[in-house]
Image (cartoon, coloured by chain):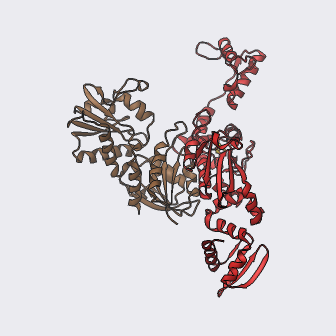
Chain colours: A red, B brown
Amino acid sequence: MTAPLFERLRTHAADGGIDTDELSLTVTEGTYRLSVAGDEHAGLDEDELQAVLAEYPDYLEEWGFWQTRAPQAPARWAFLRWVEEADDAAPPARRRALVDGVSQTWGQLHLTVRLDEEARRTYTLRHVDDADTPDERLDAHTDPLDARWIAKHDDDGRYRPLKTAPTLQTGWHFSGLNAAAAVQTIDLFYPATIANRYREQHGDLDVTHWAETTERQTGIYAVTEELEGEAVDWVAEACCEDSQCLKRREWDEDEDRELSVPRGDGRFPCREPCSLVIAAARKWTMLEREEEQAYTLHLTPSEKEQLETLLRAVAEGTAGTVREADVREGANRYRTRFLRAKRTDQHGRLDADDE
Amino acid sequence: MADALVIAAHGSHLNPGSSTPTYNHADRIREAGTFAEVREAFWKEEPHFREVLRVLDSDEAYVVPLFISEGYFTEQVIPRELRLQDWTPDAWASDGVSATAATFQAGDVDTQVHYCGPVGTHDAMSQVIAHRADTVLDDRAGDDVGMVVVGHGTERNENSAKAVQYHADQIRQQDRFAQVEALFMDEEPEVEDLTEHVHTKDIVVVPLFVADGYHTQEDIPEDIGLTDDYRKGYDVPATVDGRRVWYTGAVGTDPLVADVILERVRDAK
Ligand code: SF4
């Protein structure tokens, strides 16, 4: 047991007592009462206290980490406890598990905590798809702020306007992070997810539904208030499903009308329509103002099917994966160019009659 | 607990470079170590204005808008999204370019927010604009140099023009340049007529924008005749109507802007 740690423990005991992780300690007029791992020790003086505690090093170390070294902000603290499921294991078992390392997934992040040679917690972070990739094949990072730049582009180099889109790039790892740096890095990859998950677990997630969010908008986004009913379901289906965003949608049209779309299985909640959705909704509001018209369009059954395949391919983002010569695929470029040649005029307009 | 600084910027869904100056200024300030935490927040990126306060540890935060002028964003959008209780633009008691700071309670967290005026209208910004001009000029420019501050003009509010005018006036008073003008993309006097408005042999043009984007990299170079197509690029200096025109990037990307952000906080204390 290190002297500073013992001193810190004594200060905390004098300052309101300690009661955590199967370790409780109070002091009355210089006499200590200790309960550790279920064993009770009363009437200890300082030397006796030190002697007894020396028998329970794991309890003392764990107290030192959780009460003095880990970030004390409640959401971050709770997140770090969750990472190693600390509430489910007594300090000795917990520390044994940490020797091998304990991992959790947060969105597409794979976080591992283990004890280093000095028996201190050290955190590493990488993409879930790189969980088994050797470190030397990944770009090494140690500064949490680097996460902002990694989060900007996907593996194809395209800009990611939505931080929780399931398109986080691979090929990097952070190592040597302490607890504070680990939560900071995660919060830079997925801002506010730790804070909002904590609120949700404590029953005070401040969900703002669609109607209220759009009503709040001004300027060019004020029009989004017009979009209601089924169109809101389409918005959520377009943007918020797990294939598009890893947050679990907790907002609905309003308190009384749940959307028909799955909320998603993400661990962290989405508490209101995000700026990307509002910006897209502005476009949809304008488009939804148009009146429907009937058109007569002549297509073979295969051509109709091909149009459906094309819709699906663009919506699922798979159009780019169709092989050059795979003309069996409706979303193949040659197949599509053939359809365009046959069914559109020189301006690319479909050969359809207004009724 | 020590204080937090939040730099509130626009950000973009389309342009990955939009947030870069914000990140860079935040990093410079972090290095100085003045604040317990420094956090960037955005209208179009994350953390959004709406959720930035809840990721802070501190119970006191200085929010500095990385915007050019007082107006729609600083008066409506940011205070609303931060949920500043009882905010009204009158709290700044500003004439359009004189906002300093006012203090509010946030609605969703126990954070006291010192909401500062925008970076763009701070006095110190005039120095940054002039410095920006100096860094692009070289020995070829003699004493007869005219300086132009370019603004967007009246897009959403008249204060954006006021801010440009204000800095042009301040720089004029310093007698560093033979002539100083404020010109605009969208209103009179227009930057398109650069060589009609400025009579000097050398002209240095500084756009008062927060980040480089299509205005500063495409529209203005074409408007002032540096090139007829921005994709072809252009020289600095370039010859336009027989004058030598020196063009800088957006002033908001200058590292000195980090100091202006700190000035904003100092004024609020
Ligand atoms: S609204 Fe929420 S769930 Fe939907 S895309 Fe935006 S962040 Fe994801």
Q: Name the residue located 35 percent from the left edge and 43 percent from the top edge.
A: B161
Q: If the image is split into quadrants, where does the C terminus of chain A sit?
A: top right
Please state if B201 lies on the left or on the right of B183 as rendered: left
Relative depth, front residue between B105 and A187: A187
**Picture coordinates of residue A310, whole percent (x, y):** 70, 24
Say above or below: B243 vs B85: above
Image check: B132 left or right of A210? left
Up/down of B42 relative to A79, above or below: above
- Residue lying at 41% horizontally and 61% vertically, measured from the top left: B268
Is residue A348 visible in the rendered image? The answer is yes
| Residue lying furthest front | A117
Q: Quadrant of ligand 1?
A: top right
Residue A223: image location, x then y, percent: 57, 40
Q: Residue B96 or A96: which is nearer the viewer?
A: A96
Residue at 72% x, 43% y is A132
Along the viewing direction, whichever of A238 and A155 lies nearer the viewer:
A155
Q: Is residue B45 visible?
A: no
Q: Quadrant of the N terminus of chain A?
A: bottom right
The x and y percentages for residue B144 are 20, 36
- Residue furthest to the bottom in view is A29
- The relative height of residue B31 versus residue A140 in the rendered view (above or below) is below
Answer left or right for B101 relative to A2.
left
Locate residue A182: give its quadrant. bottom right
Residue A184, position as x, y percentages in the image: 59, 54
